[in-house]
Image (spheres, rainbow, N blue to C red):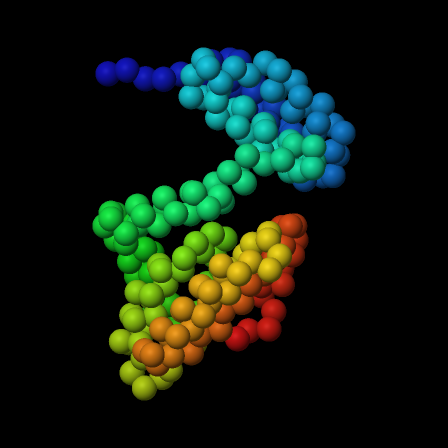
Amino acid sequence: STSTVASPASSCSKQTLMEAAAAIFEGKTNMANEILTRVVQVSNPVVCSEQRLIEYLSLALKSRVNSFENPSSMNELFSKEHDASTQLLFDVSPCFKLGFMAANLAILETTLDQPSSNKFHVVDFDIRQGGQYLNLLHALSARQNGKPAVVKITAVTDKEGDERLRCVGDVLGQEAKRVGVCLKFTVLVTHKPGDLSRLTSHWP
C-alpha cells in the first residue's frame, strides 16, 4: 500500500493560509494581503492537486479581502449555461434526486422529537430551480396528522431583483397549497455574512 505525506512546503503554505484567514477575521486586511501575495507567488497549481487547492484557497481569501480588485471566480458557476447544464443533469440522472430525497429525510428525522416538529425553516444558499423541495412538501403533507405543517424557505442570494427566485417561490407556493402545507418563501439579498443574523428573526 502507498501513503501520501504532505511536503514541508505544503504544510507551511497551509499554516500561512490559516494565518491569513485569522488576519481577515481580525480585520487586519493589509497583513492578510501581504501573506496571501506571498502564498500565490510560491504556489504552483501545475505540480499537484494539493498545490492547486492552496492556490484556489488563496484566491478565495484575496477575494474576501477585496472582491472588487479580486473578483471571485465562483461567479462563473452561476451563468445561464451552467444553470441549464445542471438542470439537464438533474433531469436525466437519478443521483441528484436520490441525494435530495436523503437530505429531506434527514430534515424530517431530526425534527421528529421536537415539540414544534410541524415547523421548519430551511436556509438555502443555492436553491437553483427549487425542485429539491417538492419531495419535502409531499412528505410533510403525508405526516401532518391533522396538524398543518408550516415551512419557511429562505433563499440567500447576492443579486438584487432576481426574477428566477420569484418564479421558484411561485412554483413552490402553488405546490404547497395543492398538498395542504403552509409555505412562506423569502429571499434574502446579502453581500455580508453578518447579515445572516436576520434569518433568526420574524418566524414564521
Q: Is residue 29 left or right of residue 194?
A: right
The image shows residue 159 at horizontal and vertical percentages of 59, 53
161 shown above or below 8: below
Check the image and report above or below for 187 versus 64: below
Q: In this view, does 18 lie above or below 76?
A: above
Q: Could you tell me which residue is drawn at 66 percent across and 38 percent down?
A: 67
Residue at point 70%, 29% (across, down): 32
The residue positioned 48% from the left and 22% from the top of the image is: 52
Residue sitting at the far bottom: 146
Left or right placement of residue 29 versus residue 19 in this view:
right
Residue 46 vs residue 9, the one in the foreground: 46
Which image quarter: residue 59? top right
Q: Position of residue 126 (x, y in %)?
A: 47, 52
Q: Position of residue 8 (x, y in %)?
A: 51, 13
Report how many numbered discs are placed on residues in the image: 0
Quarter residue 48 falls in: top left
Q: Quick check: can you spot residue 23?
A: no
Q: Can residue 75 be seen in this view?
A: yes
> Which residue is found at the position 56% from the left and 54% from the top?
157
Please give left or right for residue 28 compared with residue 62 in the image: right
Picture coordinates of residue 81, whole percent (x, y):
43, 43
